[in-house]
Image: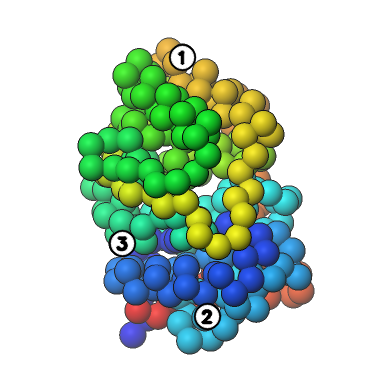
Amino acid sequence: MTLTPQVSVVIPVYNEGEAIVPCLERILRAVLMPAEVLVVHDMAEDTTVPFAQSVAARDPRVRTVLNTYGRGPANAIRFGIDVARAPVAVVTMADGSDDPRQIEDLARLVERGVVVAAASRYMPGGQQVGGPRFKRALSRGAGRTLYMFARVGTRDATNSFKAYSTAYVRQVGIESKTGFEIGIELTAKAARLRLPVAEIPTIWLDRQLGESRFDVGRFLPSYLKWYRFAFGRRLTMEQLAKRPASSAARDDAQAARAASTVAPAEVRDTFSSNHEAVQN
């Protein structure tokens, strides 16, 4: 029996190699609702691809998807959400730091009406284990002040492990093109639009294999941009749409979805499985 996915799990990857296999296996065991798992890579020669494809051969919920927006995690996440077929997209990392058992809980919050559901390390019941102290301090401080003063609906706006209404994302667009600041961007936009955001506690574990590619110095300016944006006055969807960057982001999303149906054969093969039903 074939089913349309309820949730699209978007995993940006970069040369994860064999380490992607246990990550995917944990997700596939944990997610019981109809799902697609998109392993989004920037280049055909990424070492993650053959290992992800070996898992896909056993479980058709998994697909490798070539990101055509440009390299980097923000572009990979943007592309993954734009081509997702489910009404809910959950972004999670390939390093095993996120708890895959919470994917369904996050997705169900979006099904109930929130536009952003955050896995929060900083609410009661949440915890962050490991990671650089300076990064932890910045993240916790940003989350606390955004929650208290900008009323963004979560104490952990900077965490990438979130679920989104894909309809909401396609309305507001994603402007981030650098690092992992998409989480705070979409949370800040929801706050300015007065749209509902919710959170559940999570325990985040620092990656055990490989090295983190989060560069505080490189990504901090982009985080600060969206941190400041969250404190503005209320916006309507029309006012947000008039921002040139928002319009460009929506154009990118429309082009990506169109490419999945009308692209030349050599490109269309990359996207073909976006139109196949997902096996339960």
Does any portion of residue 224 appear in the rendered image? yes
Residue at image position (53%, 39%) is 132
234 with respect to 135 (left or right): left
Q: Position of residue 51 (x, y in %)?
A: 60, 78
Looking at the image, which is closer to me, 260 or 76?
A: 76
Q: Residues within 10 Å of mark 3 (few under 14, many from 20)?
A: some
Q: Earlier in the sequence, mark 3 or mark 2?
A: 2
Mark 1 sits on what residue?
232
What type is the residue that disc 2 sits on? Ala
What is the secondary structure assignment of the residue under circle 1? Answer: loop
Q: Amino acid at mark 3?
A: Arg
The local secondary structure at tag 2 comes to helix
Residue type at the position of mark 1: Gly
Disc 2 target residue = 56
Cα–Cα span, label 1 and label 2: 44 Å
Disc ID at residue 101? 3
